[in-house]
Amino acid sequence: MTDAARPPIRSAYLREEHEMLRAQLRRFVESEVKPHAAAWEEAGHVPRAVLRRMGELGFLGIRYPEEYGGSAMDALASAVFAEELGRSTFGGFAITALVHTDMASVHILNGGTPAQKARYLPDIVAGRLITAVAVTEPDAGSDVKGIRTGARREGDHYILNGAKLFITNGVHADLYCVAARTDPRGAPSQGLSMILLEKGTPGFRVSRALDKHGWRSSDTAELAFEECRVPAENLLGEEGRGFYAIMRNFQNERIVLGAMAMGEAQAALDLTLDWVRTRRAFGAVLWEKQALRLKLAELAARIEAGRQLVYHAAWLDAQGFDAVKEVSMVKAYCGELVQEVMTHCLRFHGGMGYMRESAIERMARDARVQSIGGGATEVMLEEIAKRL
């Protein structure tokens, strides 16, 4: 069954504009992603022309004000966007776009000056300028307070020294939102700032492109800053408030990662349903085996529960409610569930599920990171426990 023929998603949270966005995204993925994305996996990155095309179609500006070319939609729109990219079955493609739209450039929208927004956001929305966010370090991931990269002030410049690791879009981005410690003597949560860094700035280099288990079409890098001089006017927001900017956007990041995971899980279930209804064994199609049917029914129910949890958290966020507990539930539940779904779906494909030519093999590899990136499951469970 093609995606276009599958029943529509039903939810009390979604409005007509959300479903119109979904339909447009699904057409784009079917016609302009799936036929070509295997080559992107081999190349190790998504071609810039594809991202520009997404900008032309309005996909990169869903949450951005109309004055910059965006659509000024809400967190539910981001959830739909992420879910449909997850359904593409190419996690590397999906995360390339989502880092740009919902994890990196949002720091400019949230903390940028009018001049910074006017300079960068139109090109970001159009896909002419691709962004990355540089927070994670060898000794600091979810533990943002542990960031060591420093930025000392010298006149009209900040001088950056340090390293960043596992940076998505790190090789090919044009603009980086870098978390750096501007006050080494301050409290861990008080001395961080966000600084804009353009590619080609002297003292900044991509140390190496990283080879990954999954997300093969997403370029990921280790970055180095060696006496890197950045104009002081590139400070994003207030000096010393970077920790809070990162924490603020973690909520949006975790919603879209949960939505992406549920899109992946649904796509895996759909592929497996198609497979078991045609694959014959022991004189009948696999669908006739009750054990398989019951497990697939159980997974369908749990995916639906995860999807509605994502929509609920996105709705809370769109309404301005404190949703840290619900968003942490999304990230923990969906990040673990998608891996369980992939394990069963791969097994139900039999030997073909283990072959590199099958979509489910790639999807199973891609899904492994969903319990790590954007906040490990254990970190999310701690956030939930604090609020019980």
Image (cartoon, rainbow, N blue to C red):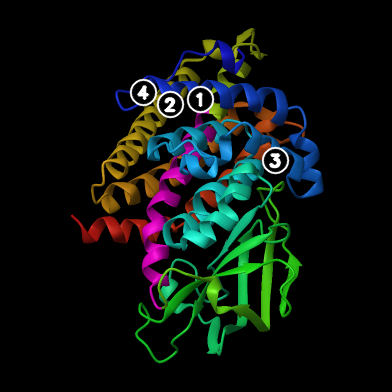
* Of marks 1 and 3, the one in the foreground: 3
Q: Which residue is the site of mark 2?
A: 18
Q: In this rendered view, identify the residue nearer to me: 167 or 203.
A: 203
CA gap between label 1 and label 2 equals 6 Å
Amino acid type, callout 3: Arg
Q: Residue at x 75, y 68 (%)?
A: 208
Look at the numbered disc 4 and give the secondary structure of its residue: loop
Left or right for 384, reference 281: left
- Label 1: element kind: helix
Of callouts 4 and 3, which one flags the residue occurring earlier in the amino acid sequence? 4
Q: What residue type is labelled 1?
A: Arg
230 or 21, which is in the foreground? 230
Residue 144: % across, % down: 44, 71
Which numbered disc, 3 or 2, marks the residue that appears first in the sequence?
Answer: 2
| Cα distance in 3D space between marks 4 and 3 | 27 Å
Examine the structure image and report whether residue 244 is included in the region drawn in magenta.
Answer: yes
Asked if the residues shown at circle 1 and circle 2 are in contact, with their CB atoms under 8 angstroms apart, the answer is: yes
State yes or no: discs 2 and 4 in contact (Cβ < 8 Å).
Answer: yes
Please tell me the numbered disc located at residue 15: 4
Q: Please state if 206 lies on the left or on the right of 22 as rendered.
A: right
Classify 10 Å Cα crowding around label 2: few (below 14), some (14-19), many (20 and above). Answer: some
Q: Is residue 145 above or below residue 70?
A: below
Residue 109 location, x and y as percent?
Answer: 46, 55
